């Protein structure tokens, strides 16, 4: 029987793991920036996914996950393809392209809109969620915060938002929609073993990326060792180990608890961007962050 002290210890460890998850995901924008010194965006995303899939494959082998090699249904593999494309291959590439031209602070804050987009897509694409005034108000606040962020000139290379050069900003808006769509697929498929499902999805994403990595862009003749380390870090930690932590937290605390990580990611991306990359905060940053995170809090809050 679980004692009160055991429950408190489990809760404390869960909060620590959630904080580690926020730190790892928040640091990924710094790592992408460093990786782009030597590698082109398509190579950053492709190598990251390949290293991440190998990391999860090792975890699955070490934990002797029998479900990893058991026969799967065609719907299972279709879900893996959808998640591999929308949660990994596509958004990783979009963010790497965007970070060639935008600050990591700006891109990291855009990721805070993911739970709001998930909520919106859930209402549009599923039938098991009821529209509540509280959640509509939360989404509205998040949209206001995102709009304020988009019109921040410092986040848009000092040009008007509607100039062709600033389509990179739209990539930062499209990437959260990709992540959210991947989450909806996971929700609908309801995999019994999330670790095996994630491993299969990353392996499929790796297969998707290989031809594009070979066809588009050129590998550098001389590798910057910092960029190589950044690629390995992106694959092992934000893509691989973060998934293992995510699986553990979902299993023991639930998806609502894990959604709180969205408060931590933009904070860490801002800290790393300001103090390590010496980036400048976008105009309206504090107001945008307040609107977005308040919207997330209101929309996720339960009586």
Image: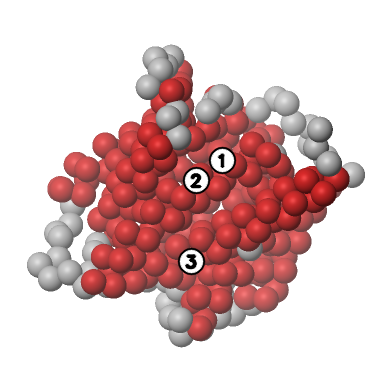
Residue for point 72% across, 65% down = 291
Locate residue 281, reporting x and y percent: 55, 80
Element type where label 2 sits in the image = helix
Q: Which of marks 1 and 3 is nearer the N terminus?
A: 3
Q: What label does residue 225 carry, if any?
A: none
Locate residue 86, reporting x and y percent: 44, 40
Q: Viewed as shown, does residue 143 lie left or right of 106?
A: right
Q: Viewed as shown, does residue 2 lie left or right of 239?
A: right
Residue for point 83% across, 41% down = 3
- What whole-number distance in Å separates the C-alpha atoms at marks 2 and 3? 15 Å
Locate residue 253, reporting x and y percent: 71, 42
Q: Viewed as shown, does residue 40 lie left or right of 160?
A: left
- The residue that disc 3 covers is 27
Residue sitting nearer the eye, 67 or 164: 67
- The residue that disc 1 covers is 247
Element type where label 1 sits in the image = helix
Is 165 above or below relative to 201?
below
Is 115 above or below relative to 247?
below
Q: In which quarter of the image is the C terminus?
A: top right
Q: How crowded is mark 1: few (under 14 residues within 10 Å), some or many (20 or more)?
A: some
Q: Is residue 207 visible?
A: yes
- What whole-number distance in Å separates the C-alpha atoms at marks 2 and 1? 6 Å
Locate residue 1, reporting x and y percent: 81, 33
Residue for point 39% across, 67% down = 31
Q: Viewed as shown, does residue 24 lie left or right of 253?
A: left
Element type where label 3 sits in the image = helix
Of circles 1 and 3, the one toward us is: 1
- The residue that disc 2 covers is 243
Q: Do the residues labelled 2 and 1 touch (CB within 8 Å)?
A: yes
Q: Are marks 2 and 3 in contact (CB under 8 Å)?
A: no
Q: How crowded is mark 2: few (under 14 residues within 10 Å), some or many (20 or more)?
A: many
Q: Earlier in the sequence, mark 2 or mark 3?
A: 3
């Amino acid at each position: 029987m679980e004692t009160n002290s055991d429950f408190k210890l489990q809760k404390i460890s869960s909060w620590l793991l959630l904080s580690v998850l926020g730190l790892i995901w928040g640091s990924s924008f710094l790592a992408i920036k460093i990786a782009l010194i030597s590698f082109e965006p398509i190579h950053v995303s492709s190598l990251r996914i390949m290293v991440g899939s190998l990391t999860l494959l090792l975890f699955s082998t070490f934990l002797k996950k029998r479900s990893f090699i058991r026969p799967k249904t065609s719907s299972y593999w279709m879900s893996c393809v959808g998640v591999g494309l929308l949660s990994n291959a596509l958004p990783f590439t979009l963010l790497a392209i965007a970070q060639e031209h935008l600050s990591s602070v700006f891109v990291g804050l855009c990721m805070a809109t993911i739970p709001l987009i998930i909520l919106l897509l859930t209402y549009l694409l599923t039938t098991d969620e009821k529209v509540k005034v509280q959640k509509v108000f939360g989404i509205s606040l998040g949209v206001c915060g995102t709009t304020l962020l988009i019109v921040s000139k410092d986040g848009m290379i000092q040009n008007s938002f509607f100039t062709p050069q600033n389509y990179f900003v739209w990539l930062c808006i499209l990437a959260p929609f990709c992540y959210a769509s991947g989450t909806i697929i996971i929700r609908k498929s309801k995999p019994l073993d999330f670790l095996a499902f994630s491993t299969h999805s990353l392996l499929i994403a790796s297969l998707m990326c290989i031809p594009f990595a070979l066809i588009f862009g050129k590998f550098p003749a001389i590798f910057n060792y910092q960029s190589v380390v950044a690629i390995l870090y992106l694959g092992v930690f934000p893509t691989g180990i973060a998934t293992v932590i995510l699986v553990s937290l979902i299993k023991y605390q639930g998806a609502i608890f894990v959604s709180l990580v969205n408060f931590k990611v933009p904070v860490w991306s801002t800290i790393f961007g300001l103090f390590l990359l010496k980036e400048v905060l976008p105009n309206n940053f504090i107001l945008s962050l307040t609107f977005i995170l308040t919207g997330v809090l209101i929309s996720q809050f339960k009586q």
